[in-house]
Amino acid sequence: MNTDKPKKDVKPEDAKPEKIKSGDSALGRFAKKYPVVYMTLTLFLLTAVVAFALGFVHGRTDPVIKERQAQQLVESVAKVVPGAADSEPLEGYEFASAVKSARVVYDSARNPLGFAIEVAPSGFGGAIRMLAGVSPEGVVTGVAILEMKETPNLGTKTRSEEFLAQFIGKDHDFKMDGQDVQAISGATVSSKAVSSGVSAAIAAVLLITQGGGA
């Protein structure tokens, strides 16, 4: 008499996969044998991936940022040169390092009114991007802060109309001595930076009007 019990069919989904030990893989064996090299290669790969991602994002966003900055610059011309209706870039001059660009400004009849000079002097928190309007005679017609990273409620007070209005009507002889221009209390570095930016803009216009082109 056959007493053997019938074998139960094992379905494929019931079969338990054989566990593979991490040390059995080639990568695992390499990591165990050369831990320092393995860690170095891993960090290198991670760094490469992050660098590629950052470069990709920068490549996509940088043109957009530059386009917005250019648009902001054009829109701010009317704030620093009263009566401005149009402006165009002015090239062919070698300005001081703080001067980033220059534009000739026209009224609605295309008569030249003056110049709009973009400058970026060094402040307490980095470069202060600003625009100064200057007449052909070298007299300031207006100043606008485009971008800054100064200390909130201290250096950022140099954005105020009260502070910037002090420069209107000044020429290359002005000084920050409390009489010509009064610095913001507690923000001397930022105040001097804006002042130096205005001076650089005046110097740039004098260079243009005195025929210092390249």
Image (tube, helix red, strand yellow):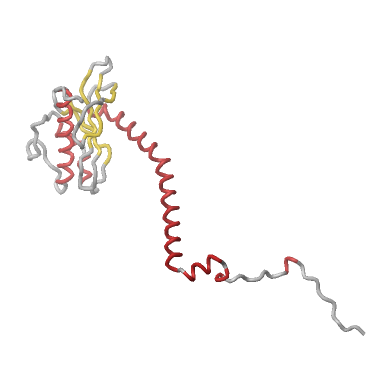
The residue that appears at 45% across and 56% down in the rendered structure is: 45
Q: Residue furthest right?
A: 1
Number of marks drawn:
0
Along the horizontal axis of the image, is 19 left or right of 96? right
In the rendered view, tell whether residue 45 sits above or below residue 108.
below
In the rendered view, tell whether residue 4 sits above or below residue 13.
below
Image x and y of residue 71, in percent: 34, 31
Residue 204 falls in image quadrant: top left
Residue nearest the observer in this picture, 159 or 64: 64
Along the horizontal axis of the image, is 18 left or right of 54? right
Residue nearest the observer in this picture, 1 or 185: 1
Residue nearest the observer in this picture, 85 or 105: 105
Residue 130 falls in image quadrant: top left
Image x and y of residue 214, in percent: 20, 25
Image x and y of residue 128, in percent: 23, 41
The residue that appears at 28% across and 17% down in the rendered structure is: 108
Along the horizontal axis of the image, is 172 left or right of 61? left
Q: Residue furthest top?
A: 109
The residue that appears at 86% across and 82% down in the rendered structure is: 4
Image x and y of residue 50, in percent: 43, 52
Residue nearest the observer in this picture, 96 or 84: 96
> Which image quarter is the N terminus in?
bottom right
